[in-house]
Image (cartoon, rainbow, N blue to C red):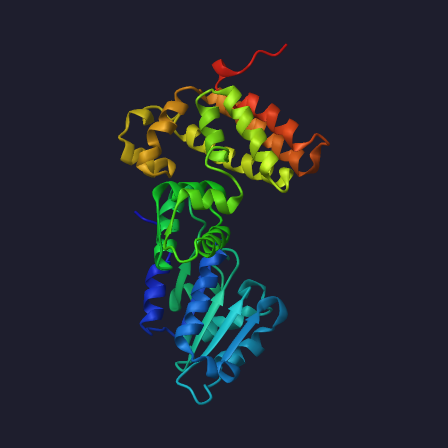
């Protein structure tokens, strides 16, 4: 049975756009970007900008007390159909148990959104009462394999198109950080000017990398065991970077995601599944599945575990754990990430 997490982001956004509001909302979860987006959409759709001064209150639990906030929620609108009260950091609101009673009788002339920055104890009041009587939703972080679809939907929601390779590049760049993904997409849309289709070349150009020398060509060279090519690509990327150390940290993050996918493919029988099932499983476009399958066949679980160890060590060094420069760190890392049979002999 699917886990109950309340209405989805899309369901709530659609309701807001159609002016279908409930008097009390309770949102929580680690994916605060989605909560922020819904908050902004609620304010935009529920109130005219001219009504904000008298009918909109945004308060933070760490700076407020419950009786004061309940008073705001119980107030009536001034010259408008409704008022809106947003309570951020609701879990930090002193004496927030008072909202147990408010949940039973919310003000019909107000729209109140209570947002927690983490998952609270839903078996204790006021959270139990809110979950029972408010419109609630949990916003968890997305999994890696959900990011490509999210990126495509976000881009289309902005009136743009994006090619599959560009989606994969962005997903590899940003991991599951939706705020970062949105920022990178917004940057790309600015970068492309009047064009409404985002391409892989746009992603590379906006990042300062080139079609021949970029982290995606680097991961392909590593996975195929092409040591000389991998070393040359890594070095050229660092030469092109304005901040080699920051660029190397980004490269390590992307390569870590690459080995996450290879690790998933080590599960017995996985490589025999069709490319569409595998694409969903590891979070890539079906067009790229064969590349990952071929790479996965060159590693075993022990080799990938060693790769993870090397990536952790490189990340530690690059973030200040050692004095070696970024070029040397990446040179040594590339050697350890190669498939076992392709690793150069150590003198």
Specify the quadrant that holds the C terminus.
Answer: top right
Residue 159 drawn at (x, y percent): 35, 59
Question: Residue at position x 40%, y 58% from top?
Answer: 194
Residue lying at the far right of the rendered structure: 323
Residue 300 drawn at (x, y percent): 44, 20
Question: Residue at position x 28%, y 28% from top?
Answer: 273
Q: Is residue 10 above or below residue 165?
A: below
Where residue 332 sits, quadrant-wise, is top right
Near-viewer residue (45 or 128): 45
Residue lying at the far bottom of the rendered structure: 79
Q: Is residue 208 visible?
A: yes
Near-viewer residue (1 or 175): 175
Q: Is residue 4 visible?
A: no
Number of disc labels = 0
Residue 93 drawn at (x, y percent): 58, 68
Q: In the image, 156: left or right of 28?
A: left
Residue 10 drawn at (x, y percent): 34, 60
Question: Residue at position x 50%, y 37% from top?
Answer: 254
Near-viewer residue (30 or 164): 164
Question: Residue at position x 43%, y 53% from top?
Answer: 192
Where residue 331 sits, quadrant-wise, is top right
Q: In the image, 191: left or right of 150?
A: right
């Amino acid at each position: 049975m699917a886990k109950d997490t309340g209405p989805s982001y899309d369901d709530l956004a659609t309701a807001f756009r159609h002016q279908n509001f409930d008097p009390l909302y309770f949102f929580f979860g680690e994916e605060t970007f989605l909560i922020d987006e819904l908050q902004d959409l609620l304010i935009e759709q529920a109130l005219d900008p001219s009504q904000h001064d008298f009918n909109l209150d945004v308060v933070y639990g760490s700076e407020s007390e419950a009786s004061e906030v309940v008073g705001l929620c119980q107030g009536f609108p001034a010259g408008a159909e409704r008022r809106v009260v947003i309570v951020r950091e609701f879990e930090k609101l002193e004496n927030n148990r008072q909202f147990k009673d408010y949940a039973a009788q919310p003000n019909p002339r107000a729209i109140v959104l209570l947002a927690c920055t983490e998952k609270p104890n839903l078996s204790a009041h006021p959270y139990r009462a809110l979950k029972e009587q408010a419109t609630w939703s949990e916003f968890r972080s997305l999994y890696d394999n959900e990011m490509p679809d999210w990126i495509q939907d976000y881009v289309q929601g902005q009136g743009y198109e994006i090619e599959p390779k560009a989606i994969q590049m962005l997903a590899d760049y940003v991991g599951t950080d939706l705020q970062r993904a949105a920022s990178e997409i917004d940057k790309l849309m600015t970068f492309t000017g009047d064009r409404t289709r985002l391409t892989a070349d746009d992603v590379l150009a906006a990042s300062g990398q080139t079609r021949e020398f970029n982290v995606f060509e680097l991961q392909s060279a590593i996975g195929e065991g092409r040591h000389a090519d991998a070393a040359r690509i890594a070095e050229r990327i660092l030469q092109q970077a304005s901040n080699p150390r920051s660029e190397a940290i980004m490269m390590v993050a992307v390569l870590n995601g690459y080995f996450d996918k290879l690790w998933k493919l080590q599960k017995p029988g996985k490589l025999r599944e069709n490319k569409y099932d595998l694409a969903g499983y590891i979070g890539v476009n079906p067009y790229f599945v064969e590349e990952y399958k071929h790479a996965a066949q060159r590693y075993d679980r022990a080799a990938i575990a060693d790769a993870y160890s090397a990536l952790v060590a490189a990340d530690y060094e690059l973030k200040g754990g050692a004095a070696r420069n970024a070029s040397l760190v990446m040179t040594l890392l590339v050697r350890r990430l190669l498939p076992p049979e392709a690793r150069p002999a150590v003198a």
